[in-house]
Image (tube, coloured by chain):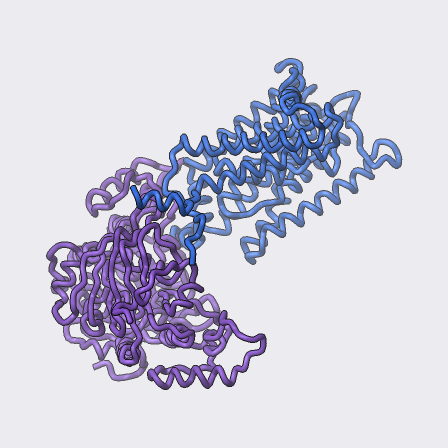
Amino acid sequence: MAEYAIELRGISKYFGKVAANEDISLTLKKGEILALLGENGSGKTTLMNMLSGIYFPDKGQIFIDGREVVIRSPKDAYALGIGMIHQHFKLIEVFTAAENIILGMDGRSMIDMKAVTKDVQALIDRYGFHLDLNRKVYDMSVSEKQTVEIVKMLYRGAGILILDEPTAVLTPQETDHLFSVLRKMKADGKSIIIITHKLHEVLDISDRVSILRKGRYIGTVDTKDATGQSLTEMMVGEKMSLDIERPEPENRKLCLEVRNLTCLDEYGITALDRVSFTAYSGEILGIAGIAGSGQKQLLEAIAGLQAGTGSILFTDPETGRKEELMGRDPLSIKRMGVSLAFVPEDRLGMGLDGNMGMPGNMMIRTYRNGKAPLLEQKGPRDLSLRIKADLGVVTPDINYPIRRLSGGNIQKILVGREIASAPKLLMTAYAVRGLDINTSYAIYHLLNEQKKKGVAVIYVGEDLDVLMELCDRILVLCDGKVSGIVDGRTAAKDQIGRLMTTVGEAAS
Amino acid sequence: MKEPWVRVVKRDEISLARKIWVRVAAILISLLVCAFFIYAVTRSDPADVYRSLVDGAVGSSRRSWSTIRDTMILLAVSLAVTPAFKMRFWNIGGEGQILAGGIITAAFMRYCGDSMPTPLLFLCMIVSSCLAGLIWAVIPGIFKAHWNTNETLFTLMMNYIAIQITAFFSIVWEAKKGSGTIGIINQKTKSGWISTSFLSGLFGKFNYSLNLIIVLALMIFMYIYLKYTKHGYEIAIVGESENTARYAGINVKKVILRTVALSGAICGFTGFLLVSGSSHTISTSTAGGRGFTAIIVSWLSKFNPFMMLLISFFLVFMGNGATQIASEFKLNESASEVIEGIILFFIIGSEFFVNYKLVFSHSNKKEEAA
């Protein structure tokens, strides 16, 4: 028996001129949990996709159980006992869990669902999953869907499991449960690779950590010898402080009062249910909640992009003038003189046009300026140059289509434009999603700058640690309702975690 | 398990020179394949055949002018469908919009040709043909804007309605009882003909110069409209993402309707150019598939009006040349269609090689050794 479940030697993968992976060699021991750590864009997912048969390496060798193999398709990967759980689940919504699990497997033309269910149930009991096999996928929470994916891989006999950022969509409690299941699987002899960029999880679950940076292999350390600081240094390549500043709010004034806001989502299901809160200038209000708890509708309703009922009253902190925003579209809100900036979650799908360069994107808010039918070109170009210099946007040319830039640079362009409009209210949805650590900290810094300037900032986030370090107050949404508003300086993480899953509990 | 023999890899960036080279190579290969086809069918020297192809397109002053005239018509339709396409409104109803404009032009020529003063007649024909095309395009536009119906099917169905209406008037207006065709309208007086109107004499013998000037002006207008105006900017944003458009405060419905109206109006105007400017009659085949060919022109030129001029010319050149081959070598019409088809297949296929490259496993090994 070979010592290693997987051994990679000199793996490289290029996309055009970009080296997504360059000469990577790493090993996965049998019966261990290996954390693959690296910033976004460091090549973790690309590397794993070559193990699951989605990509084919340009160079290098792969050994499974000490034997060299060629993985040309996901089928080959299954045959070798490799199962990958992707960030985006690959399930059929209208099928039950059991049906999804046997989907695509070889067998006779008649299916004995009872026997299958019995086998799968045995697996579920063995590892302590929470899953009802007869439930349809569309009825499931994200964490249950993830469970279906994991059970599917185990049922297919996977001895090696690869999980791509499994905790990104889970609450702290669900993460704890996932980790306990992973530990049982490890005890059972499974070999596991977990991709993540959350340091405390790496320290919690893994036996060893392999670090990638910019497509290159940096090194592997035993988890027991590592600290958050040492891992960050390997990941970023330089020493950096992980503390987020939080200046005391000054000159706090009422800016936004939301009363009984109720909205339906695109399918006519209640997305927000009588939400009420206030936001103040000079303060960062965090909004926490499981993905899809109504965060999107809340911000879009304020920005005039989502219909609803209730009241959204904007008060200009300087003049005291009040304006009702409910029932208005973005253009009429702008024409009322309410300066509101919004960094939406879906950057290229809502805030920006990926085919245009920077100037074209600067115009999105201002192209109407001037009476002439022709576009004004100089202002947007100057603003592009300024944002490029001030925020360090890396682009070959300001006219280069922004779709081809990295996520961090795209976000800088969007945030830069919104801040340049000198807003009174700044709303950001998942402003640091997909960004590397340095860029994330640059964004936190920009938000704090706005706060000091007296802007009311609303920050919808997914990383509870960041929310608790950055925000003055945190509003927790659960299933479209406000389940509590807590003080960012004193709240405990498990308290917020509980609020994320239950409505009506005392939010002391 | 063996390594895959060949893999498809997306190109990162491609130089302009290489882009041109790939396309020129595609055309050369297509001519070579055509040569095999021609030889297989006619047993004659492909070089002779190609000579006759060039001869058919630009061999005489008359043929050159007819190539120019057809190029301009195709270019006009391509310019017409482009703003809608840039907005991702898949207007495949150019054919019907052209006919709508053509019928109304024919009606004016027939009923008012002798009674109206020429300037007024032309004004009426131009305005009404634009309006007819506009209405033909705006009907699916309204359904798309308000109920998000599928515009591809809707515009396609509108074509058939226009064709049926044309067929109806072919009977109503038929020249000889039972012939089912209208024949040349105002053959004696030539009223309502661009070539003999009050503008004649300005532009010499073949009189398509006016078409040329109008369409080239339209081309420049469209270039500026799409690239430098607020309307063009709104079209680009709506096409890229409706959510981004709403975020920018753009009234999406208004932009959709305005853009398809423009698109339809230009198609209708092309109908006027066809009826008043060249054929002087109307039949179900007046549009001649240009509403569809224009889609290819618009896409191949990546919505750049100047590229559309080149591509329209190329397609018309090949088409006219192929007709000549067919008659000179005693082949039927289908032969020229086969030749055109082969050429188009290679040109469109070359887009794949502009965006992707093939990597063979042996070259992979070589890289490793290097």
**Image quadrant occupied by the C terminus of chain A:** bottom left
* Left or right: residue A480 compared with residue A246: right
A85 versus B340 height, above or below: below
Q: Residue at x 82, y 39 (%)?
A: B171
User: Looking at the picture, how far across and down is residue A434, in whole percent?
Assistant: 28, 58
Q: Residue at x 43, y 60 (%)?
A: A73
Q: Nearer the viewer, residue A189 or B115?
A: A189
A53 versus B98 height, above or below: below
Is residue A336 visible in this depiction of the protein?
A: yes
Q: Residue at x 18, y 68 (%)?
A: A472
User: Looking at the picture, how far across and down is residue A342, in whole percent?
Assistant: 31, 56
**Quarter occupied by residue A469:** bottom left
A249 versus B321 height, above or below: below
Chain shaded blue = B
Is residue A142 visible in this depiction of the protein?
A: no
User: Looking at the picture, how far across and down is residue A189, in whole percent?
Assistant: 29, 77
User: Looking at the picture, how far across and down is residue B368, in whole percent?
Assistant: 31, 46
**Image quadrant occupied by the N terminus of chain A:** bottom left
Q: Nearer the viewer, residue A454 or A187?
A: A187
- Look at chain A in the picture and name its colour: purple
Q: Residue at x 38, y 54 (%)?
A: A56
